[in-house]
Amino acid sequence: MIMNRFLISVIAVFIGFQGLFSQESIEKIKRNQENTLKEIEYANKLLLETQGKTKESLNELILINHRLNKRKEYVFGIELEVNVLSAIIEENLNASSALQVEINKIKKVYGQLIYNLYKNRNSYYRMMYLLAAENMNQFYKRVRIIRIYNKYLRSRRDKLESLREELLKKNVELEELRNQKDALAKNVKRESSQIEREISAKKVLLNQLKKKQKDIENEIYEKERTARKLGNELRRIIEEERKKSKSSGSKELLTPEEKIISGDFQKNEGRLPWPTEMGVITGKYGEHQHPDYKSVTIRNDGVYISTTKGGFARSIFKGIVSRVFSIPGENYTVIIKHGDFYTLYHNLINVYVKAGQSVNTKENLGTVFTNENTRETILYFQIWKETDRMDPEIWLAH
């Protein structure tokens, strides 16, 4: 009996723990799936905005790649969720089988007891067991023992039946979920024809871009040239601020308030809001080959973020606007100082801030420019710590 009680407790705890763990896993997968769907929808929206363009661009190809990768992630997530659900069902079925074995054992013992009590209800042996008591106290104890034993068996049987019903109910629910996910996985796989069409469209665009290799190389060179000019301007601003600090006789480059802002900025690494309300990074930091256009090497000192037409650039942290300027042939740039950190927002029109102005986190700085030829709206964004460039993706929230 002690072993039966122990087994029941272990199974109950095991089921509860596994259910909690698995449910958390499924919820996490679902959240990731929802985010992936949002990214696919947003990439579709950005690509739709390029319809009617008069010029193909490398950025469009990057957006198509982004959407295809997210579709693959979505399919993988569904299959992963189906596998998790299948594992939970298998575990519950095994636990249900173990419970059924215990139920059968208790039923057998309980049935044998009832049968024996019924068979010997008027027999000499039953009476002798009770009348053999040495006194009335022992007699009542023997009657009570039989009742307790009988009651215990019934309670154990009822408990096991209840657990078994609970498991079967859970399995039905999980089976329904698995069927739903199987159907969803099949639907996504049926979309493979759509994915193939997207790949075909991508190949057409890639071939068109290959015919314009020189134009693309010039476009990349112009972007890098602009980035160098912006970097030089930022270094010049930092140097000017250092000279002002020295001329004022201050030994510290930062004021006490700036030190606090700088420390707070540092603490928020990986949690800072994006410089656009929504967006897709279509140009990563650093030097790398384009995944499809192998002859093209891209070097970025920041990141390019594609957003929707009319989208705003916004400050990722509180600070002071150091400079608002434009270089010949380019749109406006805003540089914000956050202690010894600087953020740079390039390709703006309709700028709303001016040098020396305090800004708050997520405050709009200006409208991101939309190219009439490609119909793309792209913000160029950098983060610096003094004169050292940083990878913005490390700092922005994921």
Image (cartoon, grey):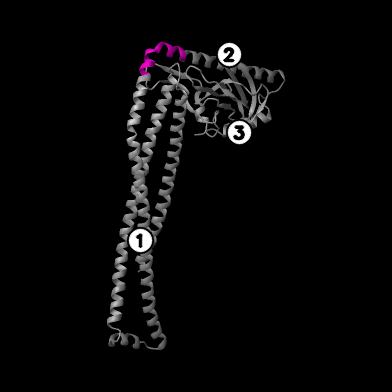
Residue 211 inside the magenta-drawn segment:
yes
Compare marks 1 and 2 and give the one earlier in the sequence. 1
- Which residue: 37% across, 48% down? 177
Q: Which mark is residue 327?
A: 2
Residue situated in front as seen by the camera: 383 or 354: 354
Q: Tell me which amino acid carries mark 1.
A: Arg
Residue situated in front as seen by the camera: 386 or 158: 158
Residue receiving disc 3: 264
Residue 380, how many percent across, how many down?
A: 53, 22
State the extent of the magenta-drawn residues as a range: 206-219
Report the magenta stretch's main SS: helix
- Which residue: 39% across, 62% down? 9
- 237 vs 31, left or right, is right
Q: Which mark is residue 164?
A: 1
Pair 1/3: label in front: 1
Marks 2/3: CA–CA distance: 32 Å
Quarter of the image containing the N terminus? bottom left
